[in-house]
Image (cartoon, rainbow, N blue to C red):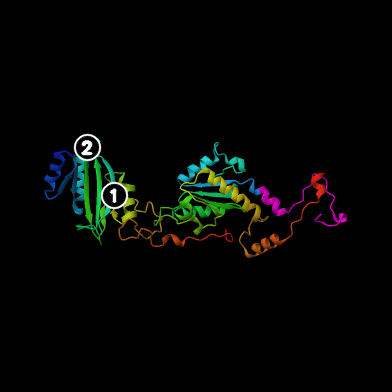
Amino acid sequence: MALGSPKNMLDLPENVVVSKLDALASWCRKNSLWPMPFATACCGIELMATGASRHDLARFGAEVFRFSPRQCDLMIVAGRVVMKMMPVLERIWQQMNEPKWCISMGACASTGGVFDTYSVVQGIDRFIPVDMYVPGCPPRPEQLIQSIIDLQDKIQREGTVSGKEFNLPARQERKRSLVELPVIQAPMHMHTR
Amino acid sequence: MAGTKPETIAALKSAYPHLATSEFRGATRVVVPRDDLVAVMSILRDERSFDYLVDVTCVDYLHYDGATDRFGLVYLLASTTTNERLTVRVFVNEPDLTVPSMTHRWEGANWMEREVFDMFGIVFAGHPDHRRILMPDDATCFPLRKDYPLQGRGERHNLPVLTRENS
């Protein structure tokens, strides 16, 4: 109906799906996150529990923990990061391939937590970009799973093919124009066929 | 018996009559002048069989009520043959914070003295590997001194900041 007169309709075979390439790439990415566990403290224990059989992160397509940053696209910083460790964390973040995301898990990684001292970084977002913050000390696996689900929504909404332009002004402009486009619905006969 | 035998104290007193000793709940403490430290420690290790240096640490007595010295080094000694334990204290003051290293007598003093240097700035003369052990190599502070602020002086803020654009 939305496409107007029947002569403008596309006659597609039933096994063809039409989408935007960005949306398709984001859909693939969000369902195959490969976490890089940067676990330094007790949050790392909860992170392990999240990946283990009881909570089973594999249900959400993110079960493959890799310990090489070259093979990962989601860094989960679980635990406090000290000043001396921060250059290592930055190096690992730079070694990860685009597109990449970061979850700051727990109070210490997000804010420094109770460790308001000279040696502990007061929140890793002072030095690297963070997509999701998980509160808790430590957070339960359900919270981490929720953050990954939320991150999947974010990836679906904000992902791009090159993955490099997340916060650039040009990217924001493009997102706005995408939102303002009218939604095109498929013809009715495609649903009923 | 975990204390110190009277013969050990007597041996020290016979060599150095002016050593101050005290006892608290069965633990004996000897306060040694810095210049006598090497000789006293040699007596303890070679003649009194204190073959185990349990710990080397330090206390900063800045703003401490009644304290007359700034830094108090603590050497915890033990003997695995006689089952004795003894605490040796040495007090040092600025500007000369040099203490002879014990690494030539107890090999295990190496890292403990490095930690004391890292945290308090005490210099151990004769140490074979006199570097920081916990703080970054380019650190300029001694964080466990009482005049160092708990939250630091902003040393951690000079790391590069990575953003989406530059990483």
Amino acid at circle 1: Thr
- The reply, left or right, for residue A121 in relation to residue B45 is right
Which residue is under mark 1?
Answer: B57
- The reply, left or right, for residue B126 in relation to residue A151 is left
- Badge 2 crowding class, 10 Å Cα cut-off, few under 14, some 14 to 19, many 20 or more, is some
Label 1 or label 2, whichever comes before in sequence order:
2
- The secondary element bearing badge 1 is classed as strand
**Image: magenta residue range:** A1-28
Please tell me which residue lies in front, B138 or A78.
A78
Q: Quadrant of the N terminus of chain B?
A: top left
Where's residue A145, x and y in %? Answer: 56, 45
**Residue B136 magenta-drawn?**
no
**Disc 1 to disc 2, C-alpha distance:** 20 Å
Q: Main secondary structure of the magenta part?
A: loop
Subunit that carries the residue with mark 1: B
Where's residue A58, x and y in %? Answer: 60, 40
Please tell me which residue lies in front, A159 or B69.
A159
Amino acid at circle 2: Ala
Q: Residue at x 17, y 44 (%)?
A: B23
Subunit that carries the residue with mark 2: B
Which residue is under mark 2?
Answer: B2
- The reply, left or right, for residue B152 in relation to residue A45 is left
Q: Quadrant of the C terminus of chain B?
A: bottom right
Where's residue A146, x and y in %? Answer: 57, 47
Where's residue B15, x and y in %? Answer: 13, 46
Q: Are marks 1 and 2 on the same chain?
A: yes
- The secondary element bearing badge 2 is classed as loop
